[in-house]
Image (cartoon, rainbow, N blue to C red):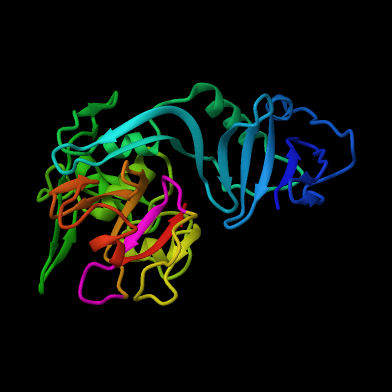
Amino acid sequence: MAAVVVVACAAVDSAGSTPDGPGPSPHATRPGARPVGNPAAERLAQEYELVDLADPARTQVRRRADQAVVATLTVGARTTVFAGAPRRFDEPSTTTAVVESTAYVRIAPRAWQPGPQIPEALARWLITELDRGDPTDVLAAAMQYLPGAPDLRDEQGVRYAGDADFGYVHSRDERDGADFYDYLEIPWTFPDTGTVRPSARWDRDLDCSGYIRLVYGYRFGIPLLNQTASTTVDGLPRTAASMAAHARSVVIAAGRNPSRPPADLSAAQPGDLVFFALHDDPALVTHSGIYIGDDADGGMRFVSSRGTADGPTFGDVRGAGVIDSGYFGDRLRRVIRL
């Protein structure tokens, strides 16, 4: 059942009527209440309505003029998907697959929690993102490390994007991987371990979790930790296994046991993190990526930094780069939304 909610700051009106029959919104208050002292929420109330849905619990932002869904917020997650101009992702050096999409993935300043009031900062953020339609979202940023991507530098001269290689050593004597600050070639201060410096052994390299941390953490502000975690943390721990188990997130899909893939991926949306067991232990998560959307053949494409492709790719190297079938589909273990 969908609950229709009029956006408000101090209070919210709701008729609570849905195609499935009448039902009160969980946010409804007295009729006639108006947003107070929050211009952004007032404008949202005038131009949009919020519709609550389940499985997973989420809220669609629908434009009143034509009922088009312009954004989707997931309860408990910061990841928000906006509708925007059609665009095309391709990687001809590794695959003939093409992803055409209108989904733009952005990170809200706080996790979405429906209620009788929309925080002013969140209302302003929503209006700003709906107005500007910045094309450099999470997905566009993720593409800036694929083969042949040009270097991009910030005002300080730090190369923050450009073709990346794969950097990871896994042997009997050593495990070492290239994190985001290695790729950036800058020191970084973490809240759990203090300042660390980039390793000289890695040159424009990223391992799979370092790639996730570069995109979601360095580029879009998700907090970053330098170590693994044993309990839930507000941010991204260092390894894929620790992210899958302990990063604060919404679980979208998981196998009935840790050794099996999820049976249903219908709730996945672009921007979700995907985790795989690629080594001998079928229950041990060893690889991570980002689901980017369906390709022209209906395959659910993901991008990740892989040794077989020597860097970030959504291509068909050592199996089709999809999460719903084949090599990676069989080894998928978990899908989460930050």
Residue nearest the observer in this picture, 138 or 47? 47
Examine the rendered structure and indicate whether residue 5 appears above or below residue 213: above
* Residue at 11 percent of width and 48 percent of height: 200
Which residue corresponds to the image point at 19% horizontal and 57% vertical from the top-left? 319
> Which region is colored magenta?
268-282
Q: Position of residue 36 (x, y in %)?
A: 80, 30
**In terms of depth relative to the viewer, which is nearer, 2 or 188?**
2
Left/right placement of residue 329 relative to residue 60 reads left
Residue plotted at (73% across, 25% down): 46
Q: Does the magenta portion include 281?
A: yes
Q: Is residue 217 visible?
A: no
Q: Position of residue 267 (x, y in %)?
A: 50, 54
Q: Residue furthest front?
A: 297
- The one nearer the camera, 15 or 75, is 15
x and y, in percent, of residue 110 in the image: 56, 45
Q: Is residue 176 visible?
A: yes
Judge left or right: residue 22 versus residue 126.
Answer: right
Q: Residue drawn 43% across and 42% down?
A: 221
Q: Is residue 277 above or below residue 5?
A: below
